[in-house]
Amino acid sequence: MKKKYLVLENGTAFEGYAFGADVESIGELIFHTGVVGYIETLTDPAYYGQIILQTFPMIGNYGIIPDDFVENCAAKGYVVREWCDTPSNFRCQYDLDAYLKEQGVPGIYGVDTRQLTRIIRDNGVMNAMICDEIPTDLTAVKEYKIVDAVNAVAADELKIYPSEGDAVKKVAMINYGAVNGMANELTKRGAEVIEVNYDATAEEILALNPDGIFLSNGPGNPEENIACINVLKKLMGKAPMFGYGLGHQLLALANGAKVEKMTFGHHGANQPVKDLFGTQTYITTQNHGYAVISDSVINGKVRYINVNDKTCEGIEYDEANALTVQFYPESVSGPMNTGFLFDRFIEMMGGKN
């Protein structure tokens, strides 16, 4: 039981014990409210540069299941109250400690995660360091910034996802840090999905002659992706578009809206989203630290808002035949009741589902 410390940029220190990789790390500390789904959380590229704090007290009880990975691990650290070293699940292949060691990610357990969560809620997201000794100089922690995030998680090899039935539509998916399940939702509905990298030009994307364009999620500050925003300006109206997460924010910026950094973001599988054009409220999975400012939306209409804090959760662009949402429209580790948005995208392309 090796001692480890989690030190916040304001100097507050928490003593715990080490697991995972025996390294030190600096990152942006955020909390995640999911009860299950720690595998999907750890393998979501949208956590690039962040230290993940789990609010649920025990993590790791069903071990590590590679078939449930949604992409590669990009986290800078992992903080839990208690980790289970004796997982029990018929699909389990190894435990959480071994996975973190494999990925080079340090972990710390035995800390008061409830107190940590309250600190973040009261003061906002802040940088932190997982270390062996409390540093006397916190300059490096205070100055840490997540930069060039999309480029850092960009896919090395792009893929073609064949339709699971007769291909009815061809979709170009711009990968800003996509998770696998989203493309699968489209292929199940008869679409062939061609993945293109985030730095593809508008001309290269249109040369594929796609019936629709899908904008994926991704990490970091959306405003730093100037080239991506300019590409979306050129693509707007050329084909039906559907986006989520970072893709939602980038298309909003391309249409003149503004974004802001949130106090502590939305990270978890229990975020309520209200449809302003109907009577439904959905429970959704989300992972973002920035939000589109609703009052700045000029070329579209805000359709979905978060019930808790009224932030923008979705925009419709009727003239351009485009729709984006902030939340994950499908989540294997959380609610799946907004999967109908994929059906709508197929219909926007002139298909039937």
Image (tube, rainbow, N blue to C red):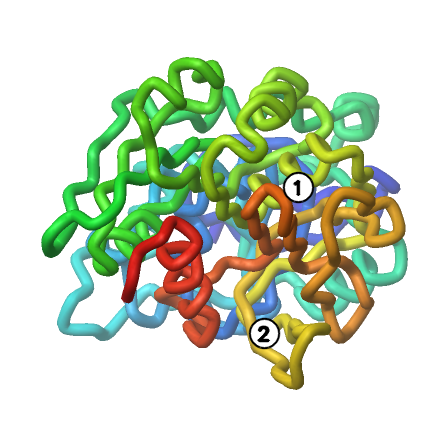
Q: x%, y% of residue 261?
A: 80, 43
Q: Is residue 160 above or below residue 289?
A: above
Q: Mark 1 — residue?
A: 249
Left or right, 238 with reference to 252: left
- Tell which of 118 and 244 is nearer to you: 244
Task: Name the kind of residue labelled 2 in the image.
Answer: Asn
> Dot 2: within a 10 Å radius of its alpha carbon, few (fewer than 14), some, or many (20 or more) residues?
some
Within the image, what quadrant is residue 255 found in?
A: top right
- Tell which of 322 and 97 is nearer to you: 322
Q: x%, y% of residue 169?
A: 26, 45
Task: Give the residue at x 80% y 39%.
Answer: 257
Task: Give the residue at x 74% y 49%.
Answer: 291
Q: x%, y% of residue 303?
A: 69, 64
* Mark closer to the chain start, 2 or 1: 1
Q: Is residue 285 above or below residue 182?
A: below
> Dot 1: within a 10 Å radius of its alpha carbon, few (fewer than 14), some, or many (20 or more) residues?
many
Task: Name the kind of residue labelled 1 in the image.
Answer: Gln
Left or right, 311 with reference to 239: right
Q: x%, y% of residue 133?
A: 67, 35
Q: Is residue 45 above or below residue 304?
A: above
Q: Mark 2 — residue?
A: 270
**CA separation, marks 2 and 1?**
21 Å
Outermost bottom residue: 279
- From where the camera sits, is residue 132 visible? no
Task: Give the residue at x 31% y 31%.
Answer: 195
Q: Nearer the viewer, mark 2 or mark 1?
A: 1
- Callout 2: helix, strand or loop? strand
User: Which of the image's four quarters has the C terminus?
Assistant: bottom left
- Tell which of 56 and 239 is nearer to you: 239
Circle 2/circle 1 CB separation < 8 Å: no
Task: Give the residue at x 88% y 61%.
Answer: 122
